Amino acid sequence: MLESSPRIPAESSARRAGRPWLAVRRVLRASRLRLRTMADRPDRRLLRRLRRLDLIRGRVAIDRLGGGITNHNFAVGAPDGKYMARLGEDLPLLGVDRRNEVACHRAAAELELAPRLVYHEPGLLVSRFVEGQTMTAADLRDSGRLARAVALLRHLHQSRDELIGEFLSFCPFRASFTYARTAARLGAALPAGLGAVLEDALRLSRRIGPFRPSLCHNDLLPANWIDDGRRLWLVDWEYAGIGHPLFDLANLAATCGLESDREPEILEVYRGPNTGPIDPAELAEFRIFRAASLLREALWSEVQTVASDIDFDYRRYADENHQAYREYRTRLEIPF
């Protein structure tokens, strides 16, 4: 899957402070200021933007929603219903392309897996609001709800022949290597020995065999699942793209903290009844992807420690995921 070594650049502090990365820092500061202004004054800028939309008429009520660790989210009450408005620009340092997000969200909405997307413009995405319970890790570990989540992912992945449009590709290993390089160049406090971890991850990536690409969500945090009492919905498609279906399944297991002895349960539900025993090679790849999910989340967090304006403890989140990766990697029956 990969061709080059993911080495972290060994740069001096003077080189890290060179002109190209000073320019990046200036862009970051400007982006933070714009987003902070829009987020802190929803009754002004956001309201003015919403007023321009034909789809929202009359009196509008805006409430900030918590929980987001990349974007600023708002519930918008209008006479014709309730909407979700999300403020978020392109985030090249995190690999977020809003045009790709729109394409993936729209495709998922047409499959009735995501809320209907009703409007988008640079920096703003508006979709129908789903009334329901936002999931927790414990909720998703429940066998019944886990089966429903896996069935939703199966539907998404099996839609490959119905997809129309252009979608970016996604590889969790490449994302991790890129995040590590970006975080190093921005001066993040990376853990000792990360270079060896990345070299090991590269070796793990070479154990993944050929596969049929599918549209995948790639960011299956519990907060991105909503249960409306009848069914599950999947939101927040900013990291979605064409990728490996097993990564979605492994990412779900990682983010909900599923016990290792229950991992075959996900594959059994995904494959459906009367499909025979689980293929040991497939289970081994699933476990490699679960490790990759933890490493990617840790290194994503490292970038956010220096790039984000959101009030969230990214340092602690990064450390927790580094630790989870180390612990899970030692359980893989694959030599370092």
Image (spheres, rainbow, N blue to C red):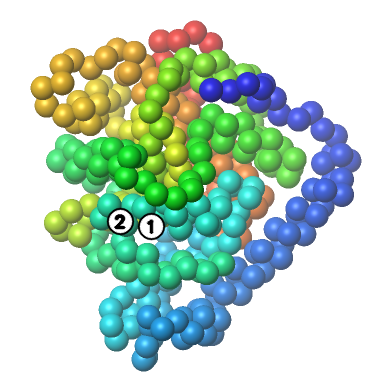
Question: Taking 295 as reference, is 195 above or below it?
Answer: above
Q: Residue at x 38, y 28 (%)?
A: 212
Q: Position of residue 168 (x, y in %)?
A: 51, 44
The residue closer to the viewer here, 114 or 179, is 114
Q: Residue at x 39, y 41 (%)?
A: 215
Report whether 37 appears left or right of 257: right
Counting the numbered discs, the total is 2
Q: Residues within 10 Å of mark 2 (few under 14, many from 20)?
A: some
* Mark 1 and mark 2: Cα distance apart in space: 6 Å
Q: Residue furthest left?
A: 274
Q: Residue at x 87, y 49 (%)?
A: 19
Question: Taking 288 as reference, is 225 above or below it?
Answer: below
Q: Position of residue 290 (x, y in %)?
A: 40, 28
SS type, badge 1: helix
Question: Taking 318 as reference, is 32 above or below it?
Answer: below
The residue closer to the viewer here, 106 or 137, is 106
Question: Taking 240 as reference, is 294 above or below it?
Answer: above
Q: Which residue is mark 1?
A: 106
SS type, badge 2: helix
Look at the numbered discs 1 and 2 and tell me whether their residues touch, using CB distance below 8 Å. yes
Report whether 190 appears left or right of 316: right
Identify which amino acid the numbered label 2 is placed on: Glu
Q: Which residue is mark 2?
A: 110
Q: Residue at x 79, y 48 (%)?
A: 21
Identify which amino acid the numbered label 1 is placed on: Arg
